[in-house]
Amino acid sequence: MYIIENTTEFQLDGSSAVAIGKFDGIHLGHQKLIHKIIEQKEKGRLATVFTFDTSASAFFAGEEKELTVKAEKRAIFEAMGVDVIIEFPLNQETAATEPAEFVHRYLVKQMRTAYICAGTDLSFGRKGAGNYELLQQYADAYGYQVELIDKVKMDGEDVSSTRVRDAVRAGRMEEVTKMLGVPYSVSGIVEHGKRLGRTIGMPTANLLPDQDKLLPPNGVYYSQVILGGTSYRSISNIGCKPTVSDRKIMGVETYLYDFEGDIYGRDITVQLLAFRRAEIKFDGVESLKAQMEKDIEAGRSYGIQAGSVSTE
């Protein structure tokens, strides 16, 4: 997969099939768009995702946290079969590009677009004035095809990044899983912690999430860990560990069931399946240990199968 970043001066070598958007969360609606451009590869077109290095919500409204940070987006797009990702720089100059100029310069000349799939809420160019109708207006003159893709609905409502974000912030992880098609995840390198878990017989893997990553409310979650292509049952705590630390550093601490080995320095992905309880400050390590034992035992009865989640 070819990644274009930090520049507006790029040129694709072949004709492209393009999906445009911020793709935060890469939910079922986004996946529908991606599958459409993947299908165009059979016609010799480059499956191309045009997204932004900074989301429009962050640039214009100050929304800082993302459902899917850059490294996660890249990994997901590559796994789906995307050929090219354009991480377009969003700044005062590029945000002021007139929609017609955006179509002519970037889509037609630089990306050699032959096919565009567009959602009903697509917007681009100055003041977000570019939309599906504008793309369709220029289609014959520039020789590309535009296909309008309807929103994916769930429980009668559109699946959107805003809806996913609201569910994450509320800790409704089962709902998030349905909208993403996969559990919400946090990835990173296992860091050395205080090793308290090891000293009380419950060793844990510690992650420091990307500072731009949106996390659900502090608390304990049923989870599973992907390590080296293998999935392990687990239970995770998201928060600052107030019982043993006064530092306000957010972390994800995870106990893996039926696992032995040293994984410090290794990349893991923690998939958050369901909320168990809020994070609280205990009156000492013994109280914390007793609650951890209850949490771990509860996690053993939480049914996990590949690709599905059950609480039976």
Image (cartoon, rainbow, N blue to C red):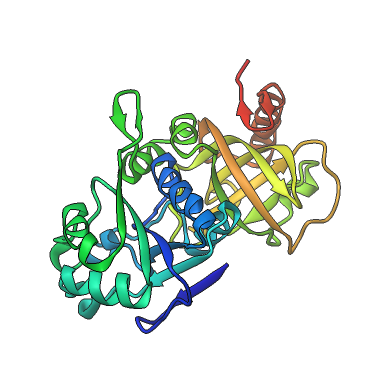
Q: Is residue 200 visible?
A: yes
Residue 123, quarter of the rendered image: bottom left
128 relative to 310, above or below: below
Left or right for 92, reference 271: left
Which residue is the extreme one toward the right? 260
**Residue 50 at x, y = what percent?**
38, 64
Judge by depth and name the residue closer to the eye, 44 or 192. Answer: 44
The quarter of the picture where the C terminus appears is: top right
Q: At 76% from the left edge and 41% from the top edge, which residue is drawn? A: 202
Judge by depth and name the residue closer to the eye, 237 or 180. Answer: 180
**Residue 221 at x, y = what percent?**
57, 35
**Residue 127 at x, y = what percent?**
13, 64
241 relative to 273, above or below: below
Which residue is the extreme one toward the bottom? 9
294 relative to 185, above or below: above
Question: How many numbered marks does the figure carry?
Answer: 0
Judge by depth and name the residue closer to the eye, 197 or 181. Answer: 181
The quarter of the picture where the N terminus appears is: bottom right
Residue 293, quarter of the rendered image: top right
Q: Is residue 250 visible?
A: no
**Residue 250 at x, y = what percent?**
51, 55
Left or right for 190, reference 113: right
Q: At 38% from the left edge and 36% from the top edge, which residue is drawn? A: 167
Left or right for 274, reference 139: right
Q: At 39% from the left edge and 54% from the top edge, which residue is drawn? A: 23
Q: At 45% from the left edge and 63% from the top edge, which residue is drawn? A: 48
